[in-house]
Structures are given as C-alpha cells and as structure tokens.
Amino acid sequence: MRRATAYALSFVCGLVGFVLLTADPSGGLVIVGVVLLVVALVSAIAFTLRVGRRSQPDREREARAREVFDQTGEWPSE
C-alpha cells in the first residue's frame, strides 16, 4: 500500500506542478510548479530503475532455461 501511495503522491505533485505552470505563467508560483514537476520526474525515473532491477532475475532465469533447452531439447519445468 505504501508504494501505491508514493506513486499517487508523485502523480499529484506532477499534476499540481503542471497546473501551476499553466494557470499563471508570469506569477511567483512558477518556481513551485517547476519544483513539483522535477519531483515527479525524479520519482518516475526511480520507478523505472526499480522496475528494471526487479526484472533482472527473470532474465537470468530465462537464460538458464534456454541453456538447458539447448542441451536437452526440452524446456525445464518450473
């Protein structure tokens, strides 16, 4: 549940930042909008990196299964 809350908070930060930038681009809230958009961007990059690291064991398992298939001609059971 904590991850979902973090992602929702990141999305809300980006949305609020975008609204602040588009609502009054000449006002003093531009800096706040930019900061909120940067926070959302950094969290999106962190999410992408986390997903990439999580899929690495799956790739290694697939590579081992392919080696077994090349040697035996049969796909290993899971």
Image: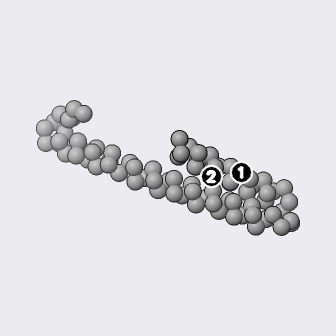
Sequence-wise, the earlier of marks 2 and 1 is 2
Q: Secondary structure at mark 1?
A: helix
**Amino acid at dot 1:** Leu
Q: Which residue is mark 2?
A: 10
Task: Using residue 55 as the reference point, say whether residue 14 is left or right of it.
Answer: right
Residue 40 appears in which quarter of the rendering?
bottom right
**Furthest residue to the left?**
72
Residue 32 % position (x, y) = 75, 64
The vertical placement of 51 against 24, above or below, is above
- Mark identifier at residue 69: none
Q: Secondary structure at mark 2?
A: helix
Identified at 28% across, 49% down, the residue is 60
Callout 2 crowding tier (Cα within 10 Å): few <14, some 14–19, many ≥20: many
Q: Which residue is mark 1?
A: 15
Front-most of residues 76 and 27: 27
Residue 24 appears in which quarter of the rendering?
bottom right
Marks 2 and 1: which is nearer the front?
2
Task: Using residue 2 as the reference point, say whether residue 64 is left or right of it.
Answer: left
**Furthest residue to the front?**
2
Residue 71 % position (x, y) = 13, 42
Identified at 68% across, 59% down, the residue is 37
Give how far apart the Cα atoms at labels 2 and 1 are: 9 Å
Residue 69 % position (x, y) = 19, 39
Task: Using residue 74 as the reference point, say whether residue 61 is left or right of it.
Answer: right
Figure label count: 2
Identified at 61% across, 58% down, the residue is 41
Identified at 59% across, 45% down, the residue is 5
**Amino acid at dot 2:** Ser
Front-most of residues 67 and 56: 56
Callout 1 crowding tier (Cα within 10 Å): few <14, some 14–19, many ≥20: some
The C terminus lies in quadrant: top left
